[in-house]
Amino acid sequence: MAKNWWKEGVVYQIYPRSFQDSTGNGLGDIQGIIDRLDYIQSLGVDMIWLCPVYESPNDDNGYDISDYRKISADFGGNPAFDRLLEAMHARGLKLLMDLVANHSSDEHHWFQQAQKSRENPYHDYYIWKSGTPDSPPNNWQSVFSGSAWKWNAATEEYFLHLYTQKQPDLNWENPKVRQEIYDIVDFWLAKGVDGFRMDVISLISKRLEFADTPQEMPFIDVMEQIYANGPRIHEFLNEMNREVLSQYDIVTVGEGPGVNLEHGPRYVSAAAKELDMVFHFDHLTIDFGPDGKYDPVPLDFVRFKEIFSQWDAALAADGWNSIFLGNHDFSRIVSRFGNDGQYHQESAKLLVLLLMTLRGTPYVYQGDEIGMTNITHDSIEAYDDVETRNAWKAAEAAGKDMDQFLKAVHWQSRDNARTPMQWNGENNAGFTSGTPWIPLNPNYTTLNVSAQEEDPQSILHFYRKTIAFRKANPTLVYGDYQDLAPDDLHLFAYRRWDANGSFWVIHNFSDQQQPLPEHFKPQTNQVFGNYPTDHALKLRPWESRVYKD
């Protein structure tokens, strides 16, 4: 297996509008990130993935880009970005930008021209279908609820938008569109950016017959079989790699909704030369019911473990994995996969030890390093997220039990991960001197960076120790992997090994003590864990242990 800096590194993801405000306008900005670089560096991470900071009307918080070469004045403009890149590189940190190439904003000049007439040179930059105002071309539904088609009166056509109505999908069949994107990528790489996370990149190739989706098909299957993994996806990614990506020493990770074990290995095959890593969502859609994320079902823990094992096996020979449990689009990891009540500290520590002992590049989302939790608003009015609000309207129109739906929102809304970073227990958690753009989680008064810096047993200090432990042991980066208790309902136990030795790792995902399996009876030495070390034959609630041969 080839060794690379991006395989050995750890990524820290920043959601800029919620990280640190330097101006007092209530919105996080680039100078705020610069002011916190020493803190980020102290975690031991190597790369920062920056969510979009481009010019945007912010219908979807920056994932609707109106100028791909311009940094929004809200975040400090291009000069602030240049200062950030310089300051990061001076500290040995690498910067991954977010590339949103499946769609643009409808306020981008391409679309402003495209919608004027069918003869406009930019018209073919987007996907259009003839029709009548009351009859969309097919039954495709937007990921954010409602039809995926919007009528444009000027041309008497519909345009496709798989996300919001202000995010028209780009037509990758048009070679001019592809070249525009490659030129944008080259613009940022030439500046010194170290790579890209590519938003919903699995969707850029469309099935041009635009057939209706089968009735009653679960949305996860629609994404996998209809929207994602289109017929030219690998051709397009290979072309982008050949034309621009391969000219630089960078890293690429593609967000892959609809990417499964069948398709996934091709995206990240070193031989195929497309992407370095992909974010699949098998483990993050595990509690989605037939109607999607707001129809949650209990998490199947055996299946959860199986997903990690299957993906490790699929990519072991020719590829590389992304190891993550959450990001800006999902609930807080300690609320979703841990216990954010009685065992908040223990389970938050368990989760980072899981991330840092699996094969692949680990991703840490801002605030997880202090165990930030989900937020519970009493009313839908307090939620900002367009996906959440659209889903609420659709549920109301469908006559659903809205009290029950609000509970699902508490569990699954993207706003859970977007509440401002909790720096201290003072006014507005030290995030802003003004009014935050989105409500803070009230627990910031006790759950914050400042308090945890003072406590040597805190989640924050454990994150630092665990990241350092991974880096000190390359076996945990490159070593082989085997699940040792795949059918256990509470324990996640596995072995990591290479020519330098073996690690035996075990996590108790429960509120009860669990007996140690036979292979973990302490004939080997415990070298790391989230409780004070002892050799008891029972694992305490949410205990993790690492043994070494």
Image: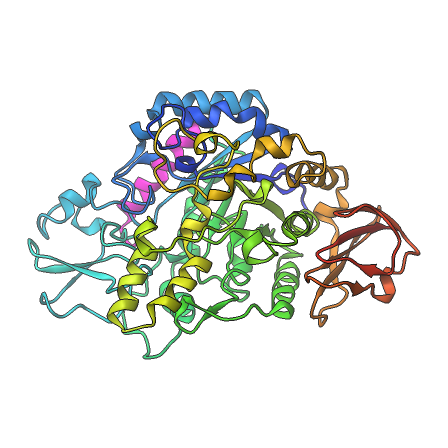
Q: Position of residue 17 (x, y in %)?
A: 39, 36
Q: Front-most of 414 and 445? A: 445
At x 19%, y 39%, the residue is 109
- State yes or no: residue 406 in magenta: no
On the image, the x and y values in percent for residue 466 come to 71, 41
Front residue of 198 and 148: 148
Front in this rendered view, residue 433 or 287 = 433
Query: At x 22% / y 56%, what residue is drawn?
Result: 127
Position of 275 relative to 44 (above/below) = below
Work out whether residue 79 can be spotted: yes
**Residue in the foreground of this view, choosing between 170 and 469:** 469
Residue 465 screen position, x and y as percent: 72, 37
Q: Is residue 76 left or right of residue 251?
A: left
Above/below status of 78 relative to 47: above
186 in relation to 234, above or below: above
Q: Position of residue 477 (x, y in %)?
A: 70, 46
Q: Residue at x 66, y 30 (%)?
A: 454
**Residue range corresponding to the magenta coloring:** 173-190
